[in-house]
Amino acid sequence: MSKCSDKNIYGGWIINLFISFIPSLFINLGINSFICFIPSLFIYKNIYGGWIINLFICFIPSLFIYKMSAMSLSNNNNNNKASSSTTSSFESRTIKLAVLAREQGEGMGARVRRSIGRPELRTLDPFLMLDEFRVALPAGFPDHPHRGFETVSYIHPDSEGIFTHEDFKGNKGNIGPGDLQWMTAGRGIVHSEVPLDRKVCRGLQLWINLKSSDKMCEPRYQEFLAKDIATAENDGISVRIIAGEAFGVTAPTQTKTPTTFYHFKIPANKKLEQKIDSSFNSFAYIFSGEGYFGKEKTHCKSFFTIAFNRDGKDGLYVETKDSPVEFVLISGKPLGEEVAWHGPFVMNKREELMEAFQDYQMGRNGFEGASRWRSQNGRRCGR
């Protein structure tokens, strides 16, 4: 009897070891080992009966435990993949160059912060120049000509002052806080830009090059009051859309050279992923605050212009931490053409540049009557 019991004890758990415990190691290391092997030590009354019973109460249930465990693992993996795709799939551009906009004299007694157009960043095709101005009378920008490009004058919404504008064709008006004037000089404009009074007018002026076939087009103005500028907001981030599309809202501005122009305000502890056409050159200018820009999350502060490489396929990533940031993000399609530029004239060849000066002096080819014209608002400068 005892021999039979010994045989059952050792034979039973040895067989159980092979049919339950060892397979369970391959199925699932962990709980199955205890569910399958430990009960098998007590099922020893009969070698064959023991392993048959063990098969049903230990090994087969372990298959279901394994299935449930596998499903749980699969779900966890899927969740991890989903999380990764939402946080890291956006490919941001990297920073090419960051330039501090330094003050310099311009016009009559005016001071501007210039970034594009400085030795560190001569141009960023198609952009020729970027100035932030804070100007009040008696300073200003009296009568001067342009040919071959566009000027974009954007008055900051918080500006205290107003700019007045006149040209030699009889066009005149005011550009107030939040207003926009997009002027295509084309074959020729002579105009004057002067503050209305002694209140400081703050804003940006951007010069955008025109392709050779557009340089001698007829001049035109696009003017938008602050209330007509497209705006949008997403997760506390606000944007004024000067040109292009952001947050599903499109500006009505028409541009000769394909251009987008956004004015962003990002509160503290926020993130922005803004799409940019992969073929466009792009830069940001920081009005105030500080943020972390591009793929490298480089820390940049007020008055810096940041030029980006055309490497991130999606656009630009910006985040803030303890401080908000306010900046413009401007992008444009490179023209890839030769540039001949001196003063207020931007052409493709030196001969065309010399012709522009001669046309202005002789009052021809778009500058008819320019030599006899004097603006009204320009007379206030220097007084």
Image: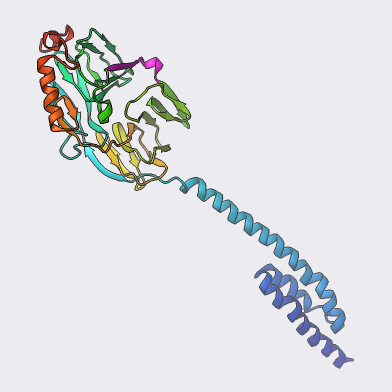
What quarter of the picture does the N terminus occupy?
Answer: bottom right
Q: Which quadrant of the figure has residue 103?
A: top left
Q: Where does residue 172 sit, x and y in percent of width and height?
A: 25, 9
Q: Is residue 98 magenta?
A: no
Examine the image and state in which quarter residue 111 appears: top left
* 169 sits to left or right of 44: left
Task: Name the residue at 72% across, 64% down.
Answer: 65
- Would residue 224 be counted in the magenta stretch? yes
Q: Name the quarter where the C terminus is drawn.
A: top left
Specify whether residue 45 is in view.
no
**The residue positioned farthest toward the bottom in the image shown:** 3
| Camera-side residue of 91 and 74 | 91
Quick check: 59 above or below 298?
below
Residue visible at 22% across and 13% down? 199
Residue 77 occupies quadrant:
bottom right
- Identify the residue at horizontal 33%, vertical 20% (top origin): 157
Q: Which stretch appears magenta?
A: 219-229
Seen in the picture, residue 9 relative to 321 is either above or below; the reply is below
Residue drawn at the location 48% of the way across and 32% of the way down? 235
* Residue 145 spot, x, y in % from top left: 16, 18
Q: Is residue 26 something that shows in the picture?
A: yes
User: Residue 108's x, y, as percent?
Assistant: 11, 18
Q: Is residue 368 left or right of residue 156?
A: left
Residue 84 position (above or below residue 186)? below
How are the colours assigned in the image?
A: rainbow
Q: Position of residue 237 (x, y in %)?
A: 43, 31
Q: Is residue 26 above or below residue 372?
A: below
